[in-house]
Structure formats: structure tokens, C-alpha cells
Amino acid sequence: MKILCVGRNYPEHVEEMGNVSSGSVSAALSAGLLFFMKPETAQLRRNRPFYIPEWTQNVHHEVELVLKVCKNGKYIQERFAHTYYSDIGVGIDFTARDLQNDLIALGQPWEKAKAFDHSAPVGAFLPKEQLNVKQGIRFSLKKNGEICQSGNSRDMIYDFDHIIAEISQYVTLKMGDLIFTGTPSGVGTVQAGDLLEAFIEDEMLLRIAIK
């Protein structure tokens, strides 16, 4: 099992991170789909606590909708992509932002800041038939009871089918793989003592204590 993560997929998040200038959406489209990978050891399951690593002072939460791949595929055509995922869940892409910024400044890869152990908590999944994918799926993250991130899949620059089709041109998808589809605006720092709760629509699917 592998974890594939899409970056820069919500316009307001692109702007808040300063990745591109005022023409954010057009620039993101011009650059093409950005994705990176996390190893299986990044997954954190069963609502276990997340322990902030000792080597970072600035871990950010990034809530995302997560697709669960249901069959193997390579060079998938976009019109068939919807048959390659069966369930949709919610997860958090924890990012050591201080380390990531240092790596970007040096022109180095992001793995140290993104792929560390337990950096990808994943909650329960819902059958996609229970959700209205075409009209858009609402999701959100609460920190200590207050909403800090909220988004809707209809606002993605690249939709689910495009993500699956394009990633499969480079990486073979296998049953059980997880695809994090990008985070909306509102990312921010977590501290020991925080409580994170992630929702699809009004259903809480993930709850994590920060240690």
C-alpha cells in the first residue's frame, strides 16, 4: 500500500501558501498536477494520538478527502477513472512547515517534511454511493471545537477522475492505495493538547489528540 498526495489543488490554498502569483489557478493548471508520495509507515489509524516530532517547531494540519483505490490500474483513461475507487474518507496531511520551507529554499525534495512516520492519519471511509460526487462533497476540520478548515470537492482544480487518470500515467495504482486529493485554505499549526476532528458533510470520521 502506498499513499499518493496531490498538492496545490484548491485555489485559495495556493494563494495562502504563496506558491504562485495572483494568477494562481491558471498558473497551477499550466504547471500540471503536482503529487508526491508517503510510505505506508506514514499512515496513522484508529484515531491514535499524533506525537509532534522533536525535530520540528511548526507542524501544520492539512485536511483532505481521501480516495481508496479498489483495483489495480495503469494508464487509466479519465472516463473510466470513477471505477477505480470505491470509498471516500478524510485524512490529514501533517506537514513540518519549517523543514519544508528550508528544503524548498535549497531546491531539495520534501520527503523529510511530508513523509515522516504517522504524518497521514486516515479516518473511516464511506461508500462513494452515499455521497454526491458530481455536486460536490463538503468536508471540514475542527481544532478544539472550532472550524479551522472547510472545503468542497467541487472547488478542486483537478477533480477525482483527472487525478486518478494522470497519476496512473506515472505510477501503477494498486488495490488499497490511498489518494489524498488536496487541502483547502486554512492550514495552520498544531500544538500539544489540541484536538482535531475531521468531517465529511456532518459526519465525524476522524478524531486525533495532539501530543
Image: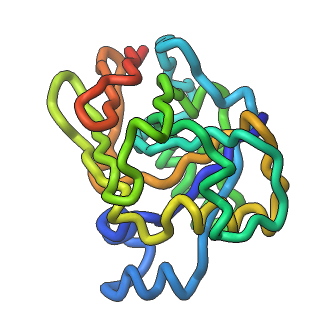
Q: Quadrant of the N terminus?
A: top right
- Residue positioned 74% across, 31% down in the render: 40
Q: Quadrant of residue 131?
A: top left
Residue 54 placed where, x, y %?
A: 55, 25
> In the depicted view, which residue is nearer to us: 4 or 83?
83
Q: Is residue 5 left or right of residue 146?
A: right
Q: Position of residue 91 (x, y in %)?
A: 48, 35
Vertical order, 98 against 57 (above or below): below
Residue extending furthest left? 146
Q: Is residue 122 above or below residue 94?
A: above
The residue under the point 38% across, 15% down is: 209
Looking at the rendering, in which quadrant would you find the C terminus?
top left
Q: Would residue 47 be found to the left or right of residue 205 on screen?
A: right
> Which image quadrant for residue 62?
top left
On the question of residue 111 being in view, the answer is: no
For the point 65% across and 54% down, the residue is: 110
* Model colouring: rainbow
Q: Is residue 177 above or below residue 18?
A: above
Q: Is 148 left or right of 159, judged from the image as shown?
A: left
123 sits left or right of 35 in the view: left
Q: How many marks?
A: 0
Q: Quadrant of residue 184?
A: bottom left
Q: What percent of the width, then of the height, locates residue 30?
A: 54, 87
- Name the one closer to the observer, 199 or 48: 199
Residue at the far front in the pictured view: 129
Q: Which is more toward the observer, 136 or 37?
A: 136
Q: Residue at x 60, y 55 (%)?
A: 82
**Residue 41 image position (x, y, % from top left):** 72, 27
The answer to whether any part of residue 15 appears in the image is yes
